[in-house]
Image (cartoon, rainbow, N blue to C red):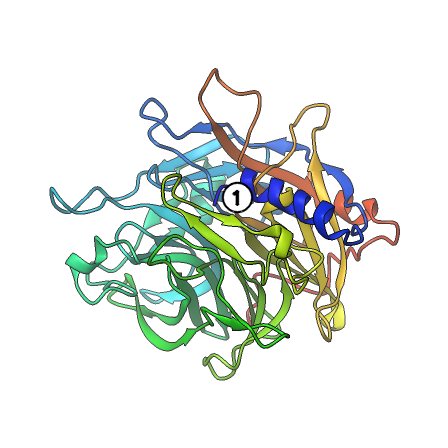
Amino acid sequence: MSTSALTALTAALVLVTGAPAAPQPVSVTASVETPAVHDDEAGGNADADDPAVWVDPDRPGRSLVIGTLKEAGLDVYGLDGRRLQHIAAPSAPGGDAAPGRFNNVDVVYGFELGGRKTDLALVSDRGRDRIRAFAIDPAAVAAGRPPLRDVTAPDARPVFAASESEVDEQRTAYGLAAFSDGDDAYVVASQREETRLRLLELEDRGGRVGYRTEDTLDLPASFTLPDGTGWRPCADPGERPQVEGMAVDQEEHVLYAAQEAVGLWRVDLDDEEFEAPEMIDRVREYGTPWTYDAEEEECVLDTAHDPGFGGKNLSADAEGVTVYHAADGAGYVLASSQGDNAFEVYGRKGGNDHVGSFVLDDGPAVDGVQHSDGSTVVNVPLGRSFPRGLLVTHDGEATPADGEREATNFKLTPWNAVASAFPEPLTVDTESFDPRDTD
């Protein structure tokens, strides 16, 4: 279902049910944006989706933003938004095969590769069902050279597909979150159009990065509502409610996963295994009856008969997830509420209580954020531009538009601008957590 349709349906739900309105999100503005990209032939079919931040060990002001562009591959930016490097997605291995398509990205630090501690950008290649690994070279950053280099093992196997022909069915690696545990590094990948999550451990294969499966988790595809009736989320025929946005709490080893049409899950990772999932919030549309319009090829929610079992915060799709770490387990889990262009904030501690929400509105130099897919937050100082941390968000509707061409990009916002916008300011803690320290 389109995000615009879901937004309209959410508004209709409030009008029909008379449900009390949630507190209005606070307004924040971004300070930097990356160049707009265009998902057409002239633009190289570039569609921005998910960002990650690499923190420079010597000069944090030289840190990088790495963003996926789907069929167009990957872009690398400085903190001023300038593009520093472009990496194309792999071409199709055969005439009928799907080409590479870079969906999500995350960073791990200090992975032992070829006998050297190496920082890695890890990417889910939805087109070829692989995890791609790129070594990040601090010396290249300092010298102004392209800093990323592909170090994916040539024998890396599909993450979910049993064969190369099955890869082309495109039920492939989709969302991605990476984390470290001492000297070991891991990736959680979700499967497109399925509820499956897979935990992979990275391996050094002769100076290249491979991986092996550690565990698999299937989230529910259907649900029993409080009144005893069964419900399954709205989806196209043959599809199950997928996950894309994910993040791992690096200190607590907890995975947060946004099942788009369902809600936000918390999954403990104990000894590199998935524990039982716990839902911490539902989308507003949870439990609403629906029908499928075959002519329009879309789901139609029956908001007039919504039983009222949905949450009050997230509007489907639930998307990009990121974790802000602070001292003694404090901090926040952020999730994109794509249906109403907001970002929901939950506490890290205890039951992940909802704290509030914010929107990124148009500012004097940078436009606002709509339909955001991916996001990432960093608590540490990143030079003079972001001395109190940084939030990077995907913008699914970058403006001004270039005629009829739809544009996307990434927005960079000082974390303290987000924190100070709340009536009770959020925590700003630049010292208690170091994303480069994995011990």
13 and 62: which one is in front?
Answer: 13
Q: Identify the residue under disc 1.
A: 64
In the drawing, does residue 143 fall left or right of residue 287?
left
Q: Where is residue 34 in the image (x, y as percent from the top left)?
A: 54, 32
Which amino acid lies under the numbered mark 1 shown in the image of this protein? Leu
Q: In this view, does 82 lie above or below 333?
A: above
* Quadrant occupied by the C terminus: bottom right
Q: Which residue is drawn at 73% across and 75% down?
A: 350
Q: Position of residue 134 (x, y in %)?
A: 36, 52
In the displayed orientation, state which residue is furthest to the top.
Answer: 403
244 and 388: which one is in front?
Answer: 244
Residue 142 visible at all: yes
Q: Residue at x 73, y 23 (%)?
A: 364
In the displayed orientation, state which residue is furthest to the front.
Answer: 305
How many numbered tags mark residues here? 1
230 and 348: which one is in front?
Answer: 230
Q: Position of residue 263 (x, y in %)?
A: 58, 62
121 and 261: which one is in front?
Answer: 261
Residue 392 visible at all: no
Element marked by disc 1: strand
In the displayed orientation, state which residue is furthest to the bottom.
Answer: 271
Q: In this view, does 123 lie above or below 354?
A: above
Q: Position of residue 76 (x, y in %)?
A: 45, 39
In the displayed orientation, state which residue is furthest to the left.
Answer: 95
Around disc 1, counting alpha carbons within 10 Å, would you say few (fewer than 14), some (14 to 19), or many (20 or more)? many
Splitting the image into 4 quarters, where does residue 430 fall?
bottom right
Q: Is residue 236 above or below residue 434?
A: above
Q: Residue at x 57, y 68 (%)?
A: 265
In the drawing, does residue 395 fall left or right of residue 165?
right
